[in-house]
Amino acid sequence: MATPSAAPQTAHRTEDQRVALQDVSWADFELILQIRGDHAGVRMTYLNGVLELMSPSVDHEGVKKTLARLLEAYAEERGLPFNGFGSWTLKKATRARALVAGRLSPSLDDVAALAAPVLRHRMALTFAARAQGRTIAELVNQLVARLG
C-alpha cells in the first residue's frame, strides 16, 4: 500500500512576465483581441505599434486584489461612488462612457477624458525618459494632444 505524501510545492513567480512585439498594426491588435475573446489570462497593451503581452505574477494579483478591496471598503464607508472596471481596454471604456452619456458611439472627447486614468498605470518610462525628467502624465497628455 502506498503511503500518502504531501504534494510538491509549486514555485510561484514573484515577477510579471512580459513580452513586447514590435511593428504590430492596430488591425492586427484588434484581430488578436477578437481571437482571444473575453477570456482572462495574458493581458495585452497596445501603443504606437508595440503590443505588450503580460502574464501577471501571483504577487501582482494579490496586491491588486488587496488594494481593490481596501478602496471598495473606503468608498463604501465614506458613501463615495466607486466603480472598478478591471482590465478594460481604452476602447471598451470609451464605449461605456458614451453609453452613460446617452450616446451610442464614443467620441474623441471620450478618448481624451479616459486616456490618463486608463493608461497611466499601464505605462512605464524608459531609463532615457526618466533621465530627461519626463513623466507618464506628460506622455499621455502628448498622446491626447495628437487626437485633436
Image (spheres, rainbow, N blue to C red):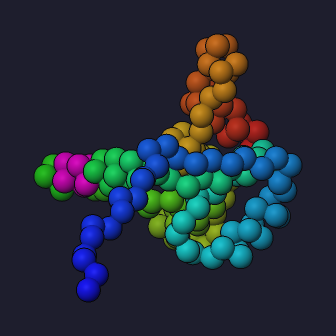
Q: Nearer the viewer, residue 143 or 39?
A: 39
Number of numbered discs visible in the structure rendering? 0
**Chief secondary structure of the magenta portion:** helix
Tell me if residue 82 can be seen: yes
Q: Is residue 72 above or below residue 121?
A: below
User: Residue 69's quadrant in the figure?
Assistant: bottom left
69 lies left or right of 132: left
91 lies left or right of 24: left
Q: Is residue 97 above or below residue 119?
A: below
Whether residue 22 is in magenta: the answer is no
Q: Nearer the viewer, residue 32 or 91?
A: 32
Quadrant for the C terminus in the image? top right
Residue 2 point in image, percent of width and height: 28, 81
Tell me if residue 116 can be seen: no
Quadrant for the N terminus in the image? bottom left
Residue 20 point in image, percent of width and height: 72, 47
Q: Residue at x 83, y 54 (%)?
A: 24
Q: Nearer the viewer, residue 57 or 122?
A: 57
Residue 50 point in image, percent of width and height: 76, 47
Q: Which residues are magenta?
A: 68-74
Q: Is residue 31 above or below residue 113?
A: below
